[in-house]
Amino acid sequence: MPQGAIGPRVVRDLMRHRVVAGRRGERLSQIAARMHQEDVGAIAIVETGRMIGIVTERDIVRAVGDGRDPRATTAGACMTAQPMTVRPGDSLASAAGIMTALGVRHRPVVEDDRPIGFVSARDVVRAAACG
């Protein structure tokens, strides 16, 4: 495979197999602190084991930029509800296409309707660079 090609790899090969989860009622300040502590760019918002949304770095920046107080604004108020997801067996090229089409940098990976990880634009770039 030529260097720089994503090729037939699948999401499972590169995804982060760790989900940092939050609750709809958590304040953005708490979500941001956890993102910083865990060194992640997105947090799954989960209820009864099922993902109902995600909060990304971009969501927090938009909320603050719109004048919302992160100590008073909840994750539920600014999360992306029911985000488009990918599966572990999906091709990395397909996941990259979804992220490009949606203009997003993080996609939750789900199996049996439960979040099992995330794939990011950084993961895709790394795969392309490493071949």
Image: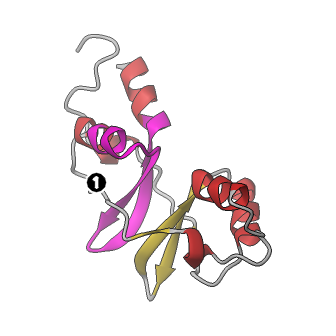
Query: Which residue, given by chain and number where applicable, does mark 1 sit on?
Result: 88
Residue displayed at 70% across by 76% down: 73
- Residue occupying the far front of the picture: 66
- Against 114, is 86 above or below? above
Image location (x, y in percent) of residue 29 = 76, 68
Decide if residue 98 is on the left or right side of residue 50. Answer: left
Q: Nearer the viewer, residue 3 or 73?
A: 73
- Against 5, is 92 above or below? below
Decide if residue 77 is on the left or right side of residue 107. Answer: right
> Which stretch appears magenta?
97-123
- Against 71, is 124 above or below? above
Inspect the magenta stretch and tell me whether residue 53 lies in it.
no
- Residue occupying the far bottom of the picture: 48
Residue displayed at 49% across by 78% down: 46
Q: Secondary structure at mark 1?
A: loop
Q: Which residue type carries mark 1?
A: Pro
Q: How many marks?
A: 1
Asked if residue 38 shows in the view, the reply is: yes
Residue displayed at 78% across by 70% down: 69
Image location (x, y in percent) of residue 71 = 80, 74
Inspect the magenta stretch and tell me whether residue 99 lies in it.
yes
Q: Nearer the viewer, residue 99 or 18?
A: 99
Image location (x, y in percent) of residue 72 = 76, 78
Residue 8, by quadrant, is top left
